[in-house]
Image (tube, rainbow, N blue to C red):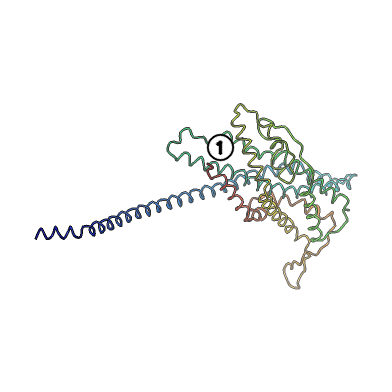
Amino acid sequence: MWEGFKAFLRRHRRKFFITGAVIGGVYLVGRYAKWRLAEWQREREMEYIEHARKQHHFESNLRTCTVTFFSLVPSLRETLMESLNCEAITAKLREKPSNKLALWEELKILSFTRALASVYSSCLLFVFLRVQLNIVGGYLYLDSLLLTRENSNGAQMHIAEGLQKRYLALVTYLLGDGLDFLVEDIKRSVQDILGQASLKEKFNHAQLTRLLNHIRQSIEHSNHSIPMIKCTQGVSNGTAGNGHSRKGLEKFMMPQDIESCCGSANEEEDDNFRNLVAETLDILDSDDCRTVLNLCLDSGFSNFISNMVPFFQAEELDTGAVGGLLREPSLNLPLAKIIPIVNGQVHHILFDSDNSYFQDLFKVGSARDFAANVYEAFSVEVD
């Protein structure tokens, strides 16, 4: 019997070997597939966690942009109120001086300039902070990854604290010299277009809208360049890139002579600072940034113009009604009556953080997408 069994094994040993190899192979393939599936699941989980972490960091960065924006608006407002002091002229007019006509002419230019400067400066600050803080946010995210990795000792940070403070201080240019240059450009355009308009000339709302759009076109297509100002106290007080004269509204956001800001004891930090500025200028000069800025300005001008509609509406009283019905803005008002209306717009635009102007500005959806693209570009490690 035993001999018969051994003979059976000899006759069928090849089949046993093949069967065993197949079974073993299936088992190994199954184990490998199970391992790969577990590995894939772990990778997907890590990617999900990383994506959620990155998204949370971006959302937090956007909130920082919002808080920073509203913290700088009072400074913006005070500068405009001081440099374009329409209230002082109004106070003089109440005293019925002999040069009343000249004061009205001055008030005409200053009131339009201040209202338009409120729109432009707030939109420029809104866009600039989204560029600047998302560049910093992207680099800080990469630095946070470095700190969580093993063997990260000695790894070079993407943006050190000192460099970060130095770079963020560039916003003072927009609130200082940049704003002064912006006001000069706006005032020049207002003077060119509105200077010869009589105080008695009448405008309806549609005509005023066309007038404001005409001034806007003049401002945005101006060829006036910004003079180069030397940097003071190691921060940008009027400096930029490499001395090139920039055209477009970005010239009011970044100074013209960045080299004068460099010269600290740390040459490596100077180089990193130059790189940060160059990256910022590339973004500010991009078509995407200009598109977002134009959309923000469209929103700002739309709100500014719409806010003056009630002053051009005739009130029609119905018999027995309390109050009246507001009709289409069909009234024709002399320029002398429009001036106080325009002059008061700065109080609507820059005085209340919860007003409709800022609400509309923050609803510009492409601004969020643009901020996300900037953040993503600087939060990805480059080999």
**Left or right position of 143 against 233:** left
- Residue 162 or 48: which is nearer the viewer? 48
Left or right, 382 with reference to 218? left
Which picture quadrant has residue 188?
top right
Residue situated furthest bottom in the rendering? 319
The part of the image, by quadrant, that contains residue 131 is top right
Q: Nearer the viewer, residue 262 or 38?
A: 38
**What's the residue at 72%, 40% (across, down)?**
178
Q: Residues within 10 Å of mark 1 (few under 14, many from 20)?
A: many
Residue 355, x across and y down, in percent: 66, 54
Which quadrant is home to the N terminus? bottom left
Task: Give the total of numbered labels.
Answer: 1
According to the picture, the residue beneath numbered tag 1 turns out to be 159
Above/below status of 95 relative to 316 = above
x 62%, y 37%: residue? 275
- Drawn side of residue 136 relative to residue 43, left or right: right
Q: Tell which residue pokes out farthest to the left in this image.
A: 1
Is 309 drawn above or below residue 247 in the view shown?
below
